[in-house]
Image (cartoon, rainbow, N blue to C red):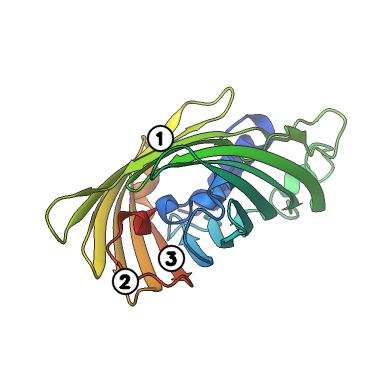
Amino acid sequence: MKKLPLILVIIILNIFIKTYGQQDVQFSEYMYNPIAINPAYAGTKEGFIMTGMVRMQWVGINDAPKSQAFSLHSPIFKNMGLGFTATNDKAGPLQQTLFYWDYSYQIDVGFDSRLSFGLNAGFHLLNLDLTGRNPYHQNDPEVYNINNRFLPNAGVGIYFYTYNYYIGLSAPRLLDQNFSATSTGQALLVRHYFFMAGYVFDLDEVIKVKPSLVFKYTPNAPLSFDFSMNLYHERWGIGFSYRHEDAVIGMFQLFLSQQLSVGYSYDYTLSDLRHDSSGSHELMLRYDFSKRTDRCRPVKYF
């Protein structure tokens, strides 16, 4: 158990400094905040939406990842949308804070279907503090600290949606960036691609079912995916999700009013970390400022 913090640090540094691993912040309740991975989602709801999320990963392990995200987006004029997302993610000695602004333009392609094109732009603030992590390598030029490294970036996305289903493709960070502080080091933030899809159908007059999935691809890293199945009633939602070779997830959502909803998810880890961790917890709070009279309209769920 005493070696776990050091092991976790090694894993984190291998992901961010040695390889091209998955680097975007991971949330289990992605289906409630798609703007985080696709800028074309901005403004596709009827009104102004605010969402906050908090994630505590691998509880029980020192230096385990902790993430927070806040986003808002709204339609403007007839066919455009604007959005903003702020994210903070800390894992061991590495902390990254992201600020991104989103713009979308939507066109009608059918009676009840629209196609949205999205752009985003923003930056990362990166901090890496290795002080005291390994006293035997204090003079090693490859062991260094980073203080508020500014990394600008931009992304694109496309999002097609109808009354009861959606499909999206995006690359929210287009620029590959090397933030190494040494001439021989290679610390990379690399491009990620996301494909997402979901469908809402009626099980009966009051119960709706929504399967959804997200594929995540990074060059030189294994393809990853999340598959989710949610069941919705007028006042609540319940479901499960499977993250490829990583976790099985249970989710619950409560609609406190037509505008306010809260969600909770629990990840049961499938890797060997499950022996030392009690799992991962995630909370979501969302407020929809739009005024809807039909609270069961399927588009409410994506």
Residue topped by disc 3: 284
Instruction: Determine the secondary structure under disc 1.
Output: strand
Residue topped by disc 1: 225
Image spot of residue 199 (x, y percent): 30, 43
Instruction: Determine the secondary structure under disc 2.
Output: strand
Image spot of residue 296 (x, y percent): 27, 63
Q: How crowded is mark 1: few (under 14 residues within 10 Å), some or many (20 or more)?
A: some
Q: Are marks 1 and 2 in contact (CB under 8 Å)?
A: no
Pick out the residue farthest to the left.
Answer: 204
Pick out the residue farthest to the right.
Answer: 183
Q: Residue at x 30, y 70 (%)?
A: 254
Q: Earlier in the sequence, mark 2 or mark 3?
A: 2
Tell me, yes or no, if residue 298 can be seen here: yes
Image spot of residue 279 (x, y percent): 36, 56
Residue topped by disc 2: 255
Q: Which of marks 1 and 2 is nearer the N terminus?
A: 1
- The amino acid marked with disc number 2 is Phe
Q: Which residue is drawn at 58% across and 22% down?
A: 220
Q: Do the residues labelled 1 and 3 touch (CB within 8 Å)?
A: no
Residues 124 and 117: in front is 117
